[in-house]
C-alpha cells in the first residue's frame, strides 16, 4: 500500500540514520495494507528530545491513527494495519505496542518488573543473535498492560491529544514511553500488546545514568498514582511484589554495569532486610558474576 493524500495511519519516526528510516519506510509500504503517510524527523543535527519530536510531528500528521516507531523496527506480518486499526477503534483503547507490563509498582524499577508481568510479541536482536519474545499466557490476540516499551506505539489521535508526551519533564530520550503509557492508563484507557502482529527490533536500548535519573523523575511524578495493575492487588501481594521487584531491579543494574549505584552496600542492604528469602542469597552471586564479567571485559 503506497502513501496517500488521505492516510489512515501516520507513521512517525525520529531518525538519526536516513538509510535506516528509508528501510523502515519501504517495510511499512510493503506490509501495512492501509493508506498511510511516513513522517521522518531528521534529528542528526538538532538532537531534539523524543517527546518534542513526537508531539510536533503528531500535530502535523493527517492520519486518524498515530504510530510512533523507532527506525530500527521492521514489521514481519502482512496487512498489520487492519488488525491494529480495528482494535484502536474501540472507545476505551489507549496505546497498542509489542512489549509491555501488566504492573507498575511504586518501587523504583524499569518498565519490566521481572515478576511474570511481561507481555510481548517481538523479535529482539542482540548482537548477531535474535531472540523471540512471546509472552501471552492467556492466549489472547491483545494482552492488557499498563505500560509499554517505546519501540512501536500506536494510538488514536484523540488519545494522544488528551495526554501528549511530557516534553517539559522528559526533555531527553529516556522514559518518554513509560510516562506516556502510564498517563494513558491513568486517563482511563486500556493499553495492549498485540499478539497477532510480529515485529523485529534491532537494538536493545541504552541503560545509563541518564536513563536512571529519568526513571527516578518518572517515579517522582507518578508517586501519587502508583501502583497500577491490570488485576487488583491487595497489600500483602504488593509487599511480596515490592521485595521481588527490588531484587530484579538490582540484578538489572548489575547486568548493565551500573555498579556505582548498585554495589556491595545495596546488595548487603537487601540481604539484611530479607534474610530468609532465597533471592537474598542468589543476589550476591549474581553481583559477583556480573562484576567479574565487567572486570574481565574492561580489564
Image (cartoon, helix red, strand yellow):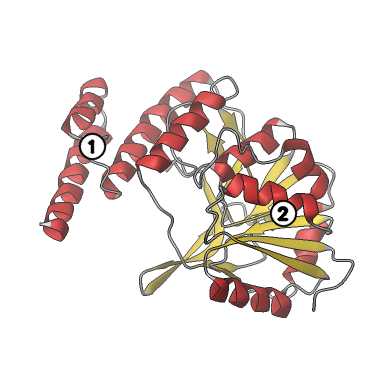
Q: Position of residue 29 (x, y in %)?
A: 72, 77
Q: Secondary structure at mark 1?
A: loop
In the picture shown, does residue 179 fall above or below 198?
Answer: above
In the picture shown, does residue 47 fall above or below 110?
Answer: below
In the picture shown, does residue 226 fall above or below 36?
Answer: above
Tell how many labels. 2
In the visual, does 160 lie left or right of 210?
Answer: right
Hey, which quadrant is residue 86 in on the image? bottom right
> Measuring 88% from the left and 70% from the top, which residue is drawn there?
5
Question: Residue 229: which numbered mark, if any?
Answer: none
Hey, which quadrant is residue 203 in on the image? bottom left
> Which residue is tagged 1?
260
Q: Position of residue 290 (x, y in %)?
A: 20, 50
- Foreground: disc 2 or disc 1: 2
> Measuring 44% from the left and 27% from the top, which residue is drawn there?
107
Closer to us: 61 or 142: 61
- Mark 1, Cα crowd under 10 Å, few <14 / some 14-19 / many 20+, is few
Which comes sooner in the sequence, label 2 or label 1? 2
Question: Residue 57: which numbered mark, if any?
Answer: 2
Amino acid at each position: 500500500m503506497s502513501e496517500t493524500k488521505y492516510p489512515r495511519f501516520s507513521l512517525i519516526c525520529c531518525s538519526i540514520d536516513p538509510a535506516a528510516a528509508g528501510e523502515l519506510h519501504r517495510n511499512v509500504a510493503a506490509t501495512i495494507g492501509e493508506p498511510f503517510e511516513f513522517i521522518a524527523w531528521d534529528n542528526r543535527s538538532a538532537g531534539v528530545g523524543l517527546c518534542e519530536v513526537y508531539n510536533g510531528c503528531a500535530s502535523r500528521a493527517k492520519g486518524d491513527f498515530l504510530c510512533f516507531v523507532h527506525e530500527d523496527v521492521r514489521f514481519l506480518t502482512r496487512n498489520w494495519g487492519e488488525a491494529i486499526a480495528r482494535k484502536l477503534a474501540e472507545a476505551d483503547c489507549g496505546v497498542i505496542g509489542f512489549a509491555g507490563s501488566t504492573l507498575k509498582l511504586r518501587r523504583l524499577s524499569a518498565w519490566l518488573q521481572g515478576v511474570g508481568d511481561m507481555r510481548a510479541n517481538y523479535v529482539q536482536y542482540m548482537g548477531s543473535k535474535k531472540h523471540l519474545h512471546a509472552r501471552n499466557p492467556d492466549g489472547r490476540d491483545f494482552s492488557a498492560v499498563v505500560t509499554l516499551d517505546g519501540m512501536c506505539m500506536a494510538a488514536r489521535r484523540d488519545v494522544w491529544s488528551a495526554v501528549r508526551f511530557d516534553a517539559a519533564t522528559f526533555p531527553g530520550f529516556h522514559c518518554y514511553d513509560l510516562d506516556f503509557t502510564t498517563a494513558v492508563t491513568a486517563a482511563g484507557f486500556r493499553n495492549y500488546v498485540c499478539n497477532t502482529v510480529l515485529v523485529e527490533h534491532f537494538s536493545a536500548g541504552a541503560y545509563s545514568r541518564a536513563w536512571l535519573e529519568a526513571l527516578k523523575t518518572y517515579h517522582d511524578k507518578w508517586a501519587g498514582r502508583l501502583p497500577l495493575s491490570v488485576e487488583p492487588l491487595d497489600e500483602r501481594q504488593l509487599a511480596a511484589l515490592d521485595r521481588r521487584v527490588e531484587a530484579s531491579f538490582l540484578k538489572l543494574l548489575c547486568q548493565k554495569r551500573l555498579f556505582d549505584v548498585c554495589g556491595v552496600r545495596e546488595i548487603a542492604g537487601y540481604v539484611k532486610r530479607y534474610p530468609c528469602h532465597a533471592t537474598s542469597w542468589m543476589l550476591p552471586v549474581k553481583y559477583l558474576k556480573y562484576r567479574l564479567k565487567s572486570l574481565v571485559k574492561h580489564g
